[in-house]
Image (cartoon, helix red, strand yellow):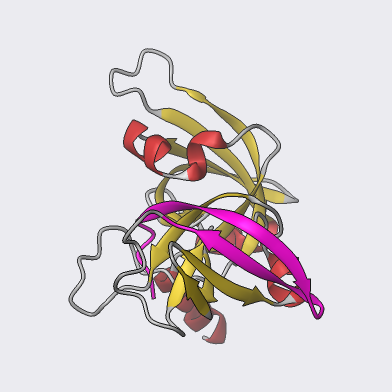
Amino acid sequence: MFTGIITAVGQIASAQLKGDGLHLVVEVPAGYLDDVALGDSIAIQGACMTATQFTGNTFALDISRESLNKTVGLDKVGPVNLEKAMRLNDRLGGHLVSGHVDGVGKVEHFSAVANDAYGSWLLRIEAPKQLAPFLAYKGSIVVNGVSLTVNKTEYSANACVLDINVIPHTLENTTLGKLQQGDAVNLEVDLIARYVARMLKLN
């Protein structure tokens, strides 16, 4: 389990074919792996992965074709959001996150909010239609591993469009600051919303 609070920005240093998947090597800040053991889970761009090897300030992992087909941003060299799995005594600063990507969305708009004293940015994402039942005003969503609050939802026949305000601290300490219109993003819906919807469907 995770919280959606990014603990570091790393860098995929290499992505090599391994079977029908990939073998990734990820560079991290000095000391980041001091409390990580082989087999531990680390979320990368919101997707839960298993650390299989450590060398200095890098760790390696194997990612299956199924995971590659369901996510974005894990198949090439570049910066990535990282979060180590939470402990039972950790603060839950974001919300309960499983690290399982539910769908891939598209950035429709991303720009600074005019006349905003705090310097926040408006992030508008087009989410897959099947995620609409789990998305609500002031509900939670994970975007590339980052726990965020939904400020507005609009539904159409083919999609659900979300408005999210992103504060400067988040822009500076995650990869969200690098997003551009048209970019694809990993999305995970709120865990509680998922189970509530399932219970209502069974009734």
Q: How many labels does the image show?
A: 0
Image point (71%, 59%), residue name: 75
Q: Is residue 4 magenta?
A: yes
Q: Give the range drawn in magenta.
A: 1-28
- Name the quadrant containing residue 124: top right
Position above or below: 128 against 114: below
Q: Where is residue 106 in the image (x, y as percent from the top left)?
A: 67, 45
Query: Does residue 51 appear anywhere in the picture?
Result: no
Q: Which of 157 and 81 is in front in this view?
A: 81
In the image: residue 194, left or right of residue 139: right
Task: Determine the main secondary structure of the stretch shown in magenta.
Answer: strand
In the image: residue 146, left or right of residue 22: left
Q: Nearer the viewer, residue 200 or 119?
A: 119
Name the residue furthest right.
20
Q: Position of residue 166 (x, y in %)?
A: 41, 36
Q: In which quarter of the image is the N terminus?
A: bottom left
Name the residue furthest front.
56
Position above or below: 151 against 136: above
Q: Which of 128 and 103 is in front in this view?
A: 103
- Name the quadrant containing residue 56: bottom left
Q: Where is residue 144 in the image (x, y as percent from the top left)?
A: 53, 54
Q: Position of residue 33 (x, y in %)?
A: 36, 68
Image point (74%, 50%), residue name: 157
Query: Does residue 188 appear anywhere in the picture?
Result: yes
Q: Does the magenta stretch include residue 71?
A: no
Image point (38%, 81%), residue name: 37
Position above or below: 107 against 16: above
